[in-house]
Image (cartoon, rainbow, N blue to C red):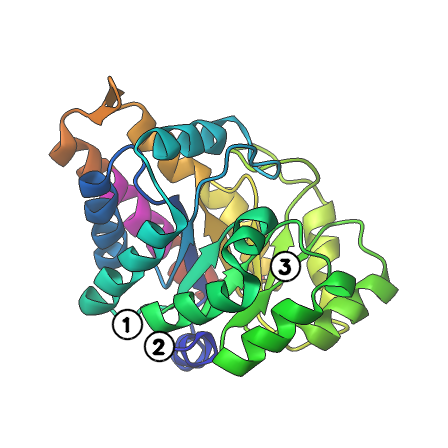
Amino acid sequence: MKIEEKFTELKNKKQKAFMAHVYYKDPDKDFSEELIKTMIDSGIDILELGIPHSDPTSDGPTFIKACERSLRAGTTPKQVISSIKKIRKYSDIPVIVTTYFNIAYRYGIYKFIKDIKHAGADGLIIPEAVVEESDELLKTGKKYGIDIIFIIGPYSSGIRIKKITDNASGFLYVVSRTGVTGVKKDLGIETSATIIKIKKYTDLPLLVGFGISQPEQVKKIIQAGADGVIIGSAIAKIYENYIENRKIINKEECLDEIRKFVKKIREDIKNIFYQKK
């Protein structure tokens, strides 16, 4: 299912989006694939599938460890791309690939986008990509029908926001705060202000990420006008507690805890949408 179709479907159902981010093969292939199926079955709307990097500059401590475990498991870009084909056999959920620029560059931008498209991906996030230097990304993405998802921070100027929104497709990834990914208790008033500011320039859906883990945070984001939330570190934090010697122990208990967490967030999003602001 294309990203645009998913947001149309959610709008018709009067719901907001829940995108979950995981790094493939953390800590191993079998658990990772079961984790993805569990999240899909529990109600996520979009899957953000990460290719691990040895220097994930946008990630906080939890995802840095996730990348390290995934790399120790021997994860390669081709393996992650192949995993999308398996996901496609299981679900038509939109899949967004996240990777750092040098991975895509070494693979070959053109070939990378072509291969993720043929595998069944719908979008691509490269955290450090700037719109002024993304001509090849945008051109190839348009050719193969891959939405290039740009990130907008809380201190982006109106001029910069317009540059991004004039070139973006799919949705916009709104950073809730400065810094790196990771669970935080407070998002700050800047998040609401950022959402309001961006909406002056575009009708594209806005998904907010970085540090989201609690119902009250989700509520503030949705009520500020966002079209959904992105959660990653909070999920990784759950299964991190079950890792011993690079393996998941008590797998069923672990997956059940994640299942309950995802369902709770999904239900929170649904309930918040119907509440008066």
Q: Is residue 71 above or below residue 92?
A: above
Q: State yes or no: discs 1 and 2 in contact (Cβ < 8 Å).
A: yes
The percent coordinates of residue 212 (x first, y second) are 51, 42
Q: Nearer the viewer, residue 247 or 249?
A: 247
Q: Which residue is mark 2?
A: 1
Element under label 1?
loop
Sequence-first tag of 1 and 3: 1
| CA distance separating discs 1 and 3 | 29 Å
> Residue 55's mark?
none
The answer to whether residue 52 is left or right of residue 126 is left
Which of pointers 2 and 3 indicates the residue nearer the eye? 2
Q: Residue at x 34, y 45 (%)?
A: 24
Q: Residue at x 58, y 54 (%)?
A: 105
Element under label 3?
loop
Q: Quadrant of the C terminus?
A: bottom right
Q: Which residue is mark 3?
A: 224
The outermost residue toward the top is: 245
The percent coordinates of residue 203 (x first, y second) are 65, 78
Q: Is residue 1 above or below residue 154?
A: below
Q: Quadrant of the N terminus?
A: bottom left
Look at the image and give the residue range highlighted in magenta.
258-267
Magenta span has 263?
A: yes
Element under label 2?
loop
> Residue 92's mark?
1
Q: Amino acid at mark 3?
A: Ala
Q: Residue at x 74, y 76 (%)?
A: 166
Sequence-first tag of 1 and 2: 2
| CA distance separating discs 2 and 3 | 27 Å
Q: Nearer the viewer, residue 69 or 198?
A: 69
